[in-house]
Image (tube, grey):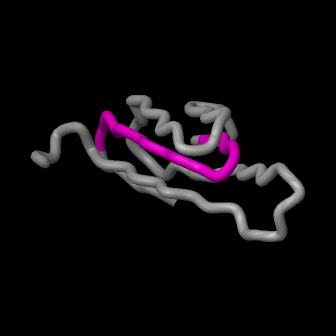
Amino acid sequence: AWTFSATTEVQIAAACDDRCVVFVDGNEVLRTTSFGNTGTTTVSLGAGSHQVSVEILHGGAANNPAGLLFSARRTSDSV
């Protein structure tokens, strides 16, 4: 869980093989629909704890694992 003491803007990015959906507190906030594409979004989260989950779908007939690249950062943080 992520926990914040005040309302916080968070930028989320995800890239998956093949598709993924990112949820915060059970609400879909980001969906990528094809391999190799990175999706990004910014969400405003109130003070308190927040659950983050990712659902990954790996399609096709190849016997290889799904992949996920995920990042999240407060927008107030410098890069």
Question: What range of the chain is rendered magenta?
Answer: 6-23
Q: x and y percent of residue 17 in the render?
A: 65, 52
Question: Compared to 24, does 51 lie above or below?
Answer: below
Of residues 37 and 9, the one drawn nearer to the viewer in this rendering: 37
- In the rendered image, residue 18 lying in the magenta stretch gets the answer yes
Q: x and y percent of residue 70 in the render?
A: 47, 54
Residue placed farthest to the right in the image?
Answer: 61
Q: x and y percent of residue 73 in the render?
A: 30, 48
Of residues 23 and 45, the one drawn nearer to the viewer in this rendering: 23
Asked whether, in this view, residue 17 is left or right of residue 78, the answer is right
Asked whether, in this view, residue 24 is left or right of residue 33, the answer is left
Residue placed farthest to the bottom in the image?
Answer: 64
Asked whether, in this view, residue 43 is left or right of residue 6, the answer is right
Q: Residue at x 42, y 35 (%)?
A: 45
Question: Compared to 59, does 9 lie above or below?
Answer: above
Count of marks overlaid on the render:
0
- In the rendered image, residue 20 lying in the magenta stretch gets the answer yes
Q: Residue at x 69, y 43 (%)?
A: 19
Q: Residue at x 57, y 51 (%)?
A: 52
Asked whether, in this view, residue 71 is left or right of residue 9, the answer is right
- The part of the image, by quadrant, that contains residue 12 is top left
Dominant secondary-structure state across the stretch colored magenta: strand
- The part of the image, by quadrant, that contains residue 75 is top left
Of residues 78 and 26, the one drawn nearer to the viewer in this rendering: 78
Residue placed farthest to the front in the image?
Answer: 62
